[in-house]
Amino acid sequence: MNRSIGIFDSGVGGLTVAREIFSILPGENVVYFGDVGRYPYGGRSEEIITKFTVQDIAFLMEHNVKFIVCSCNSASSVALDEIVDNYDIPVIGVIKPGAQTAVKKTTRGRIGVIGTNATVSSNAYARTIHALNPDIKVFSLACPLFVPLAEEGYIDREATHLIARDYLQTMLDVEVDTLILGCTHYPLLKNVIAEVMGPEVTLIDSGEETARTVLKTLTDASLLNPRAAQIPAPEGDHKFFVSDVPERFAQVATRFLGQVVDKITRVDISRY
Amino acid sequence: MNRSIGIFDSGVGGLTVAREIFSILPGENVVYFGDVGRYPYGGRSEEIITKFTVQDIAFLMEHNVKFIVCSCNSASSVALDEIVDNYDIPVIGVIKPGAQTAVKKTTRGRIGVIGTNATVSSNAYARTIHALNPDIKVFSLACPLFVPLAEEGYIDREATHLIARDYLQTMLDVEVDTLILGCTHYPLLKNVIAEVMGPEVTLIDSGEETARTVLKTLTDASLLNPRAAQIPAPEGDHKFFVSDVPERFAQVATRFLGQVVDKITRVDISRY
């Protein structure tokens, strides 16, 4: 199965998921689409997010991918359930992997979820967690400033600590034992969030968990690239597509991915 | 001339300009379009911003407006000069009014401009200022976090002060005597910016200056609504259109406009 894995996101955030997939599945070919021309999704309506998501998937399908990962929490939350059955290949989001791990790790049945307005309003994490265990208490909180802070590289700054403390105080008040980072940008602020929440609270990175789910699903469905069995596995081909000029994407991608990204092509997503 | 004034913006920011226009020209009918479905423009490319701007103007033209104000600094900076001649009504942006006032007010010929990445990269303020007086020194600085901070109501907070101090230190270092708030969101942070810059620095609100230019241009062209001459002038009709669901716009608009906004209609801007 030499066909590629398709990953899409509202922009650069999904690169934290791509990084995990590259790391776990180095032999796989990957096509990444970042919708930077219409970014961000998190403050938009369900209807608009669904329209954009359908277009993003249509673009990846054109690349004959074998598997699609929606690495945007907002799109995964509000759009994916409704549309996944329309495709003849697996399309997975980041909610279920994050929710499943949180349910496994919670010690006192008190799980917090932080994300964008769209993710939090959708209640998708709480629904998924309750389907697994209805007794767990779920507390959700939108942290809209975390995305711009992460994008601007405002990571280890006093202002970011103050904002994190403001936002997360409610999570401390309700004494969650596990906190899901329900937005692909948030792993960049992991140290700040961990410091505010304290060592007792387990942080769940939905991106990491999603990468593990991709590995498992591909293995179970015998869809792994045969190259993956070679030792050492030859490195897969990684192609990047964006819906605006590639320069800024290239710049931020280097920070998010931890490696230089050069093969970036611009596409007109509105025609899909 | 009962025809409306058209105002468009990438989102809610232009409401600070609308507020000034409502205040100076209470008798005028106004059609406002906020492109919240594709907001923000400030980090996007010149090509995409120009495409969006042309669509926004096409939408307003359908409403038979007599005059168009582009209240988005990013669109004014990168798109407007190229396209204003394509229309048979006046289309003005926010750059020239702000630049003209700054040139009048500067005492030592050192003007600072703060705005989005798009506005700063375009160099539009500097070009306009130098066309008026080539001897003035212009210092430009992108402050990308100011927009999300203003939108989230993070106004009088310690974190906002710290970020403002980080950003504006370079403006203090180069000793500007006048600072243009080159983004319609920034007037909401005026107190914080004023505190960092100190009492010696004159702050120019491009929105305020643009409203004055609208009054002057309408007067000169005999395009004022005849109702404006009545005492007291009956209040004009204000219609609002947005490119995503109106709820969040309504909520933020109240803060930006200082009055409740109810007549909001959703439009599909991609078909223009």
Image (cartoon, coloured by chain):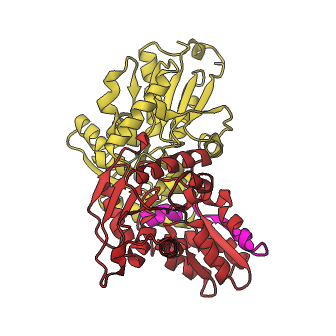
Chain colours: A yellow, B red
The stretch of residues the image draws in magenta is B129-152
Which of the image's four quarters has the N terminus of chain B? bottom left
Task: Inspect this view and state whether residue A192 appears.
Answer: yes
Percent x, y of residue B100 = 63, 75
Q: Is residue B35 visible?
A: no
Quick check: A267 above or below B131?
A: above
B140 to the left or right of A152? right
Residue B269 higher or lower than B205, as above or below? above
Where does the C terminus of chain B fall, quadrant-wise? Answer: top left
- Depth check: B242 or B112 in front? B242
Quadrant location of residue B127?
bottom right
| Residue A37 horizontal side relative to residue A143, left or right | right
Decide which of A225, B182 is in the foreground and name it: B182
Q: Residue at x 63, y 46 (%)?
A: A248
Residue B264 lies in the magenta-colored region: no
| Vertical relation: B142 (above or below) A89 | below
Residue B68 or A178: which is nearer the viewer?
B68
Q: Nearer the viewer, residue A43 or A47?
A: A47
Where is residue A23 shown, x and y percent of the image? 58, 31
Task: State which quadrant residue B26 falls in.
Answer: bottom left
Residue drawn at x 51%, y 48% is B54
Residue B248 location (% of width, % of height): 33, 57
Q: Residue at x 41, y 45 (%)?
A: B269
The quadrant where residue B253 appears = bottom left
